[in-house]
Image (spheres, rainbow, N blue to C red):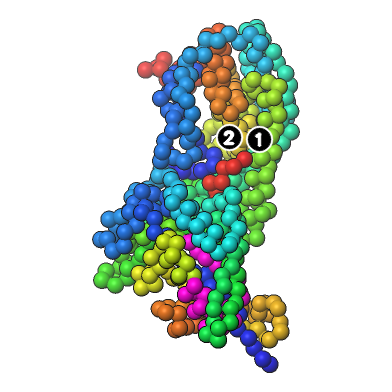
Amino acid sequence: MEWETVIGLEVHVSLSTKSKLFSGSSTEFGADPNTQASIFDCALPGTLPVFNEEALRMAVRFGVAIGAEIGKRSVFDRKNYFYPDLPKGYQVTQLDFPTVGKGALTVTLSDGSEKVIGVTRAHIEENAGKSLHEEFHGMSGIDLNRAGEPLLEIVSEPEIASAEEAVAYLKKLHTIIRYLDISDAIMAQGSMRCDVNVSIRPVGETELGTKDRNKEHQLVSLRGKGDHLRGAKTAGNSRGRWPHHSGNQTL
Amino acid sequence: MIAFASSLDQAGPITKSAEDAALMLNAMVGLDEKDSTSIDRPAEDFTASLNQPLKGLRIGVPKQHFAQGLSMEVEEAVRNALAEYEKLGATIKEVDLTNSHLSVSAYYVVAPAEASANLSRFDGVRYGYRCEDPVDLEDMYKRTRSEGFGEEVKRRIMIGTYALSAGYYDAYYRKAQKIRRFIKDDFDRAFEEVDVIIGPTSPHTAFKLGSKSDPVSMYLEDIYTIAVNLAGLPAASIPVGVANGLPMGMQIIGAYFDEAKILNVAHQFQQHTDWHKQKPGPIASNEGEA
């Protein structure tokens, strides 16, 4: 049987706003641990979010650049999970109503041909803090400087057929983001990160490996320049149904 | 104020009179730049209209709030208060809050769902109780939250987490939000015909602490106030009588941003009655002994 690869990319970009998505703390890179964490970033009970409009402007700029539909109404949701570097116990993100809807990128491949790769959506969300497991003698250190920084998660359609196309897509994305000046997009500093979903299916099939869940959910993370693939099998889909944000007060 | 259910949370003062409540509200209102749910409106003096006569006031009485489940003594006390309003020149009109029977069910999906997320931060890492000598992170989470929260809180966290979980979201949370909209629409329609809506605050006088073992029967005590909370309307509860030494309350509900009208209606009642000056039996007798 002939097999083919289907790749979808999820790219996280740190938006280069001066302050965080829902607080006034600075987002400057490289500060001493926890010197850029306000009472809201620490999830002090009673504190409330104040939206950073600049993050919205940047997301819209990206959406316009890739010819995407811009959500006239976007809604933030809460994605619940417990982890010490997530002080609120949930990440604020956009589930059903992202700011950027369907769009597309055109990439040029090494043989000179062009390919249009669809972008499913791009949504704004908060970054988590950082857990440091070394230097703490069996304990973990938590740095909340990064907690609450605005991220733009750009989700591609599963239309990428090879590592070469994936790299071309990432380079194009990088160029656009740098040109728009919405992020430094430096992979080494984590301001641009990429998750790769690789699916394998018999040639000619249109469904995404739904018959074999293991094959469908081979998650691979892409590091550095994008040419080093590290594979890891996961048991389930990482993008299941999220618990919803309660703060949608539109009646 | 610590978040419980963000879309329902609201600060409200407990005062000795409607006039005091107006003074408190004067101090409390206004835009808070660190609270995106606050609204920038022109300053208002809530004491200014307290003495406005009630002649011509149209009072809506929801038939669903006087139906099965309401105790006779509370009904009588509220009906007497309505008669007092008629003496002051108000007219009474029955209004239909068709979906009010759904409010408790909707509330007990929305509130636990939001609470389950809002209470996540009490995990032993930073705030509140932390269990003794946790062996690892998971042990700390589990024991901190099992030991630190009370039964009712844990019940709500579990119900809320269930209502939000994959596959149940549409059946519970989304449906509850739709019901919430219907409840709001009922009030909007009613306020096209009346200025305020008046009914009992709760169906019975206060029950003894711990006397209700069934949570649902306890939830039903909030049946009249919950709909107002879901609709996001302002309301005041004022004393209208005493039964078996315990106070009974009447709820005055206003349209959006009609707090001044509510306080005016409450204040006029208190100018002509003295229920708000009476102390409930146990407090009065304790003072007698002292």
Q: Amino acid at mark 1?
A: Lys
Task: List x then y, in percent, for residue B172.
Answer: 65, 51
- Which sits earlier in the primary sequence, circle 1 or circle 2? 1
Vertically, is B277 above or below B192?
above
Whether callout 1 and callout 2 share a subunit is answered: yes
Rendered-image quadrant of the N terminus of chain B:
top left
Task: List x then y, in percent, for residue A209.
Answer: 66, 79
The answer for which chain carries disc 2 is B
Q: Secondary structure at mark 1?
A: helix
Vertically, is B187 above or below A191?
above
Q: How far is mark 1 from mark 2, CA to CA? A: 8 Å
Which region shows up in magenta? A152-172
Q: Amino acid at mark 2?
A: Gly
Q: Residue at x 48, y 49 (%)?
A: B118
Q: Residue at x 40, y 68 (%)?
A: A185
The answer for which chain carries disc 1 is B
Residue position for label 2? B232
User: In terms of depth relative to the viewer, which is nearer, B225 or A41?
Assistant: A41
Residue B184 shows which numbered tag?
1
Q: Residue at x 56, y 36 (%)?
A: B211
Mark 1 and 2 residues: CB-CB less than 8 Å, in contact?
yes
Q: Is residue A241 visible?
A: no
